């Protein structure tokens, strides 16, 4: 009997937990501070220590192509989880957009934070060091043209220890996110 219970605990429960937890990502822009914020929302509560987010977690943001690379400034961690990023010039693959891949830089050492159910948790924020050049969006794991290049691990991914093994990310709740172009003096006099 004990062997059967161990089998259930180690092999069946993690798969059941993984099937239960679903996480979405959202990208928002605050015009007043000119800051982009990435948040997550889980349909299931996870508390420390089982709320630990693993190093295979990733948030990919699609940005307009900029010669020399789209510049991130003021990258700010909004939880105890630290974030770093890498950049891909999409034109090297014949694509029109570029990509920023954000991943936890301290996944093994940070103090896990509570993940309440159905609540937005701001993960990190950043500003554009390149100015307002067009819309940003979260990566589409199914339809983005970068999916045609299997050598890149571009998919959004969220792995939470208490949710069991595997990716619990299921989609984005935001579409294209526009920055506000500043009004020029001429546009201001015309009432635009």
Image (cartoon, helix red, strand yellow):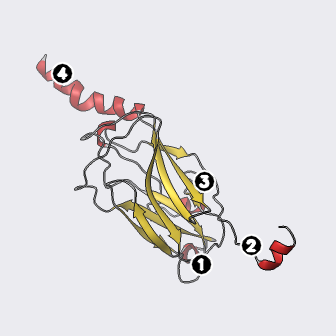
Residue that sits furthest to the front in the current view: 189
Task: Give the image location of residue 27, x and y in percent.
Answer: 55, 54
- Could you say which disc has been placed on residue 183 in the image? 2
Sequence-wise, which precedes: disc 3 or disc 1? 1
Q: Earlier in the sequence, mark 2 or mark 1?
A: 1
Question: Which quadrant of the figure has residue 66?
Answer: bottom right
Foreground tag (2 vs 3): 2
Q: State how far apart marks 4 and 1 are (Cα).
A: 56 Å
Of helix, strand and loop, which one carries label 1? loop
Q: CA distance from mark 3 to mark 4?
A: 42 Å
Q: In this rendering, would 179 be left or right of 141? A: right
Marks 3 and 1: CB-CB under 8 Å? no
**Residue 28, image x, y percentages:** 57, 55
The image position of residue 21, as x and y in percent, is 41, 35
The relative height of residue 185 versus residue 139 in the rendered view (above or below) is below
Disc 4 designates what residue?
5
Residues under numbered marks 2 and 4 in contact, where contact means CB atoms less than 8 Å apart:
no
Neighbour tally class for label 1: few under 14, some 14-19, many 20 plus, Cα within 10 Å: some
Mark with earlier residue (4, 1): 4
The crowd level at tag 2 (other Cα within 10 Å; few <14, some 14-19, many 20+) is few
In this figure, which residue is indicated by the disc labeled 3? 143
Quadrant where the image shows the C terminus: bottom right
Pick the residue in front: 20 or 150: 20
Give the residue number, with chain letter if any, for mark 1: 66
Name the side, left or right, on which 188 lies relative to 168.
Answer: right
Rendered view: 129 above or below 139: below
């Amino acid at each position: 009997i004990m062997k059967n219970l161990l089998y259930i605990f180690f092999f069946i429960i993690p798969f059941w937990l993984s099937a239960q937890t679903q996480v979405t990502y959202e990208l928002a822009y605050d015009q007043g501070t000119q800051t982009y914020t990435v948040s997550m929302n889980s349909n299931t509560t996870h508390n420390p220590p089982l709320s630990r987010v693993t190093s295979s977690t990733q948030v990919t943001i699609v940005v307009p192509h900029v010669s020399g690379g789209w510049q991130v400034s003021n990258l700010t961690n909004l939880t105890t989880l630290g974030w770093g990023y890498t950049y891909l010039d999409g034109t090297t693959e014949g694509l029109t957009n570029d990509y920023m891949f954000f991943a936890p830089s301290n996944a093994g050492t940070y103090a896990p934070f509570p993940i309440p159910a159905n609540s937005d948790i701001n993960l990190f924020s950043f500003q554009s060091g390149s100015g307002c050049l067009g819309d940003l969006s979260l990566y589409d794991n199914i339809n983005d043209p970068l999916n045609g290049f299997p050598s890149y691990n571009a998919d959004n991914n969220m792995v939470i220890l208490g949710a069991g093994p595997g990716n619990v990310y299921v989609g984005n709740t935001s579409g294209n996110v526009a920055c506000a172009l500043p009004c020029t003096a001429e546009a201001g006099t015309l009432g635009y």
